[in-house]
Amino acid sequence: MSKADIIDDIVAPGLTVIFCGMAAGPRSAREKTPYVGPNNKFWPTLRHIGLVPADFQPHDFRRLPEHGIGLTDVAKTQWGADSKIVVTARDVTRLRNALRRARPRLIAFVGKTAASHFFGCATQDLRLGPQAEPWEGATVFVLSSPSARAHTHWRPECWHALASLVRRT
């Protein structure tokens, strides 16, 4: 973690899937723990789809590699609502380099906004679920955002499809 990073990355070689969000939310930034905002569905969903044990808690996030899982964000030095984050070319380069070094089998973007910055396209050009093209050998998946702010766009079926794919790899 760089001094300016809001939350530690969990990125290393050998992981099955690395979840990539946009940036830490306000509560996550305060607690230095990802996805702990009020009513965020990330952790309950990971438990529900069986990627982590039922008793896994957000503050256990550094133990995710035990389950083949990593975490990172597009913007590591900012926090807040996705729409307020200013993503730079440096942010995208850092993320791409981290993923190249880790070489996960799957990259799961947590929301279309993170994926759109990574790929340099509009969110409406992306679809939820597996993408047609891999990125440097990794299968790419775009998930609906688990944020309470995005509740009208929540699609649990894409999370279930990711879990099925994780179990097959």
Image: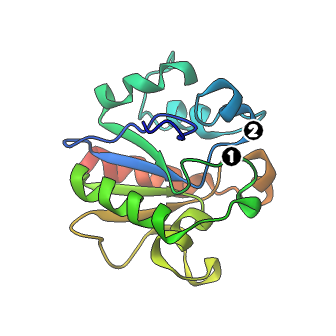
Q: Which residue is mark 1?
A: 79
Decide if residue 20 is in sight here.
yes
Contact, CB < 8 Å: mark 1 with mark 2? yes
Left or right: 121 in relation to 107 = right
In the image, residue 24 sits, relative to residue 132, either above or below, namely above
In the image, residue 125 sits, relative to residue 142, either above or below, namely below
Q: Which residue is mark 2?
A: 26
Q: Dot 1 lies on which element?
A: loop
Q: Amino acid at mark 1?
A: Trp
Query: How is the protein colored in the picture?
Result: rainbow
Q: Dot 1, crowdedness within 10 Å: few (<14), some or many (≥20)?
A: many
Left or right: 51 in relation to 35 = left
**Nearest the camera: 87 or 125?**
87
Left or right: 74 in relation to 154 = left
Q: Amino acid at mark 2?
A: Pro
**Nearest the camera: 70 or 96?**
96
